[in-house]
Image: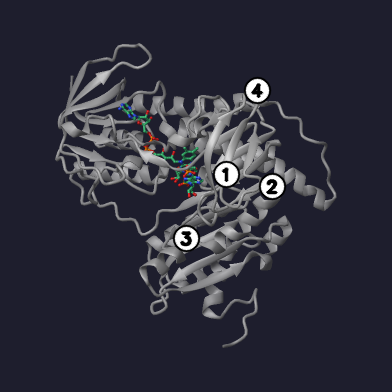
Amino acid sequence: MDTELVVLGGGPGGYAAAFLAADLGMKVVLVEQDARLGGTCLLRGCIPSKALLHVAKGMAEAEHLADWGVRFDRPQIDLATMRARKAKVIDTLTSGLKQLAAKRKVELIRARAIFESSQTLRLQGADGQPPAAERLTFQHCILASGSVPTRIPTLELDSPRLMDSTAALELPDVPESLLVVGGGYIGLELGTVYAALGSRVTVVEMTDGLLPGVDRDLVRPLHKRLESRFSAIYLNTKVTALKDLGDAVEALFEGPAEPRTQRFSRVLVAVGRRPNSAELGLENTGVKLDAKGFVQVDAQRRTADPHILAIGDVAGEPMLAHKATHEGKAAVEALAGHPVAFRPRAVPAVVFTDPEIAWAGLTETQAKQQGRKIDTAMFPWAASGRAQAAGRTEGMTKWLFDPESQRVLGCGIVGAGAGELIAEAVLAIELGCHLRDLAETIHPHPTLSESLGIAAEAALGIATDIFRPKR
Ligand code: FAD
Ligand code: NAD
């Protein structure tokens, strides 16, 4: 079997690339080992986690209404219905992708693909089913094989009580106690879900703060709230051993955690993800990997092999779905001969906790590391009518801007709904907006989006919603 373009991997990078390529008139085959399209994001990542976070948010808001004099009975949780509802969300979206592929005449092959050479893939059947062809030859391949959870050998345990994110999203039960190893995106999002459902959640993070790398002023309000929702947060701490006791898992801590040995009903290990670049036969091609196993690519996502491009998690950080999708489109446009380069000024990142944290473009942490001079413009949500009305005043919006030109370089937001608010910042950074542009843009009142305009006004000394003494 021969094709012009093969896309290896049906996640948000791969299916976007395949669909755009078909729209541009290319003959496309999409090879995916899973029975369904959608990849990590749809089947065991972004979407199921957000479906469960939706439940957690509803429960937290209902509880919060007690402050306003409205009290509900203790929630009754029917896990079977919750799982079925989550499955329905995934089924709807993955069936939609299948239809979109069919409408575009993208040929789907269910198989595990391995490179035999720069222009040949060997196809292996999945779930005992033989593949549609044994070999696939191509002019170009876009590799979009994604990433897999990082494993720590000392934390391997042959026990259903030990979970990775995929197992945790299955929601096998609501454990009485849950140990989360890793205070990053997954640990905090899924910790939030399980805490809302009633588990006593303990988070162990080996660095000195949750969400390492994220600006500390953004993390602080989240840390404070999680301290009241979680049973314990241990920083500078490692789990050095796990033991299956049958009815519980015993964890041994190294660091300030006391006592050093503690028992948990379940353990979720979420210590990062690594590129899925091993066992793909890439040694039979000219593709080069970096020290962490990411495929090395140029601005058009071309690898060192002229027949192979790479996108998404396998092609470097940040490992985020929207970055994968945009890279996929850039790679296809490059193949179509369009003058394109993947050089975003701002890739947004959102941690969907409560409160949410979102950022885009340059961060203060990066500016400090680079020795780059920046100024910041900040608006505390305590001065926002909408935040007061919602009883969520712990939020904060800040811009990073160039002190000379006042052009905005980055934005960070912590607060309820920060993930939706960051989109305006991405557009502003991409368009090269200045503080004035933001201050003069009329934001609807009363909304939290006003915080973006007022933060800019504050830096310009023209904010009326807050008072800053003259310097
Ligand atoms: P993937 O989605 O990983 O897809 C790769 C596909 O390739 C898979 O379907 C795999 O089966 C297939 N494949 C691999 N090897 C082969 C082979 N040899 N042959 C055939 N097929 C193969 N990102 C966000 O932006 N927002 C979020 O809210 C978010 N939440 C997340 C929550 C969790 C719990 C997790 C784990 C991740 C989350 N992510 C989120 C990250 C996001 O899922 C990834 O960044 C995104 O899926 C990467 O897309 P991709 O196309 O590069 O790869
Ligand atoms: P992560 O990199 O976000 O966090 C891992 C955390 O584990 C880090 O804080 C790290 O210091 C800590 N850690 C590492 N080894 C440890 C050890 N031995 N003991 C204790 N702590 C340890 O990784 P993740 O949470 O597994 O998520 C993986 C990736 O998936 C993310 O980086 C992100 O790209 C993606 N993701 C994104 C979203 C989103 O966009 N909302 C949600 C989930 C996942």
Residue 121, horizontal then vertical, whole percent: 20, 25
Q: Is residue 54 visible?
A: no
Q: Select label 2 or label 1 by which is in front.
A: 1
Compared with 219, 127 (above or below) is: above
Task: Look at mark 2 in the image and give the residue it sits on.
Answer: 229
Residue nearest the observer in this picture, 333 or 286: 286
The total number of labels drawn is 4
Q: Is residue 355 left or right of residue 40?
A: right
Helix, strand or loop under label 1 = strand
Q: Select label 3 or label 4 by which is in front.
A: 4
Residue 266, horizontal then vertical, whole percent: 61, 32
Task: Look at mark 4 in the image and give the residue it sits on.
Answer: 80
Q: Which quarter of the frame holds ligand 1?
A: top left
Q: CA distance from mark 4 to mark 1?
A: 34 Å
The answer to whether marks 4 and 2 mark residues whose Cβ atoms lie closer than 8 Å is no
Task: Look at mark 1 in the image and give the residue it sits on.
Answer: 253
Helix, strand or loop under label 2 = helix
Which quadrant of the figure has residue 286?
A: top left
**Mark 4 vs 2, N-terminal side:** 4
Q: Select label 4 or label 2 by which is in front.
A: 2
Q: Residue at x 31, y 45 (%)?
A: 292
| Residue kind at label 2, given as amino acid type | Arg
